[in-house]
Each structure stands twice: as C-alpha cells, then as structure tokens.
Image (cartoon, grey):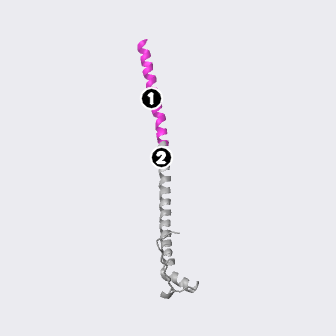
Amino acid sequence: MDQTKKKKVKNAIQVFLIIIFAISIPMLLCLYAFQAKRYTDLTKEIKELEAKQERLIEDNKKLVGEISILSSAERIEQIAVEELGMHKAESDDIIRVEMTGEKK
C-alpha cells in the first residue's frame, strides 16, 4: 500500500507540473505581447520627442538670429536718432565729475 501511495503522489506531482507548465506558456506569451506593445509605444514616443527637439532647435536658431539683428549697434543707433531724436555726444557735451574720498 505504501508503494501505491508513493506512485499516486508522484503522479499527482507530475500532473501538477504539467498543468503549471501548460498555464505558464500562455502567460509568457501574454507577457511577451505586452512588452512588445510597450516597446512599440516607447519607440513611437522617442521619435515624436526627437522630432519636437529638432523643431525646438530650429526655432531657437531663428530666435538667436533675430536677437542678433535686433541688438545690432546700427539698428539701435538708427532708432535712437530717428525715433528718439538723440544724437552722439560731442566732446563739449560730456561733463566729468570727480569724487573726493571724504564721506559726509
């Protein structure tokens, strides 16, 4: 009787392992499909972010060029003369103030 119980236990363990193995295959396939979808989504997001980065770099280059144009000395002088009525200071327009070391 001891032999038959051992055989039944051994058969039960084998059946249990076969069931676990049979269940694990679809679970692994589902996990693989999930990972593949996640990889595809991340790849798409990376491509979108790289395209956005390229657009931002181009926009930044344009803005730097506009800053260079707008901050040029010739343009500032033109605005000062034409719009603000300013002129370059003559040497007799410059007043020098000297400070002494005394504190009051």
Crowd tier of the residue under label 2, counting other residues whose Cα lies within 10 Å: few below 14, some 14–19, many 20 or above: few
Q: Position of residue 30 (x, y in %)?
A: 50, 42
Magenta residues span 1-30
Q: Which mark is residue 17?
A: 1
Kindly identify the amino acid type of the residue bearing the numbered disc 1.
Leu
Q: Residue at x 48, y 87 (%)?
A: 91
Q: Residue at x 47, y 42 (%)?
A: 29
Q: Give the alpha-carbon distance from disc 1 to disc 2, as whole Å.
A: 26 Å
Q: Position of residue 8 (x, y in %)?
A: 45, 19
Comparing labels 1 and 2, the label whose residue is closer to the camera? 2
| In the foreground, 57 or 13 | 57
Q: Residue at x 42, y 17 (%)?
A: 6
- Asked where in the image residue 13 lies, by quadrant, the reply is top left
Q: Is residue 90 visible?
A: no
Q: Which mark is residue 35?
A: 2
| Residue 83 left/right relative to 52 | right
Q: Which mark is residue 1?
A: none
Q: Is residue 46 above or below residue 26?
A: below
Q: Position of residue 23 (x, y in %)?
A: 49, 34
The quarter of the picture where the N terminus appears is top left
Kindly identify the amino acid type of the residue bearing the numbered disc 2.
Gln
